[in-house]
Image (cartoon, grey):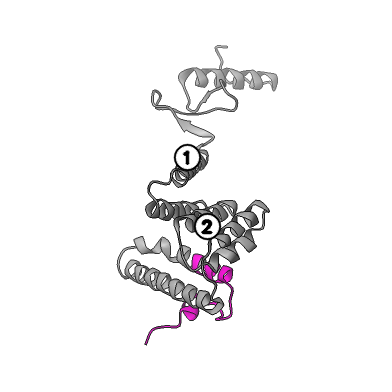
Amino acid sequence: MSKNPFVVLGVSENCTQNELFDAYRELRNKYADLRFAEGQEGTDACAKLEEIELAYREASDILRNRYNVKYTGSNLTDVENAIKAGNMEEAQSILDNCHERSGQWHYLQSVIFYKKNWLSDALKQLDFACNLEPNNQKFAEARRNMLNKMNENTAKQNTSYYRNDNHDSNRSYSREPGQRYQRGFTACDCCSSLICADCCCECMGGDLISCC
């Protein structure tokens, strides 16, 4: 006997498509990294992810059949209008109730995910759109732009206040462009420090370096 997909995802059978997807996404993210763990933990995580994916597909089909809304071109036009108006919830609701998942459907889903800053999910939807319509230049261009956007974000995250220069084994950092400070302690630094310390001692009546 198969498990109730709504129970697997931890949602009510009267949930909306948005609530269903949020629950699915949260569970998927929870187990996504665990699948790479060694031993039984990784095996269990992979099995759980398969169960979550299956449950989401089954629950989505149940909700679509419940509302019995068939795909028409006007549905997707309404989605586009809702996106332009900034009403992402309405756009998602219309998409969720479309019976057929065309390339345009996945493209519009990617736009909604992008608006929510879910870049990985947006890219996945663009992959689906490009696979369904490989000659669609609009989808291909959107996918290239998405990859560039994600690469830019990755580059920004990898930018560090500290950096290693290939030509210098010492680690350095920069406060302003053109200003560099080297970490380390040289012989000159040692002499300078001793002279400063001797001056301070003499001011206090002592003498750290007798020859100076």
Q: Quadrant of the C terminus?
A: top right
From the top left corner, tell me how far across and down residue 33 is, in percent: 41, 60
Q: Which mark is residue 21?
A: none
Task: Rate crowding at label 2 as few (under 14), some (14 to 19) or many (20 or more) other CA atoms within 10 Å.
Answer: many
Q: Give the labeled residue for mark 1.
A: 148
Per the rendered image, the range of residues in magenta is: 1-25
Residue 165, located in which quarter of the rendered image?
top left
Q: Residue furthest left?
A: 39
Kindly state the secondary structure of the residue where label 1 is placed.
helix
| Side of 44 relative to 74 (left or right) | left
Does the magenta portion include 128? no
Instruction: Choose between 182 and 16: the one closer to the eye.
Output: 16
Whichever of labels 2 and 1 marks the residue nearer the N terminus, that label is 2
Q: Is residue 99 above or below residue 179?
A: below
Q: Give the labeled residue for mark 2.
A: 109
Real-space Cα separation, disc 2 to disc 1, in angstroms = 19 Å
Q: Is residue 10 above or below residue 143?
A: below
Kindly state the secondary structure of the residue where label 2 is placed.
helix
Task: Rate crowding at label 1 as few (under 14), some (14 to 19) or many (20 or more) other CA atoms within 10 Å.
Answer: few
Type of the residue with mark 1:
Asn
From the top left corner, tell me how far across and down residue 13 is, in percent: 55, 81
Residue plotted at (45% across, 83% down): 4
From the top left corner, tell me how far across and down residue 8 is, in percent: 46, 78
| Side of 44 relative to 182 (left or right) | left
Of marks 2 and 1, the one in the foreground: 2
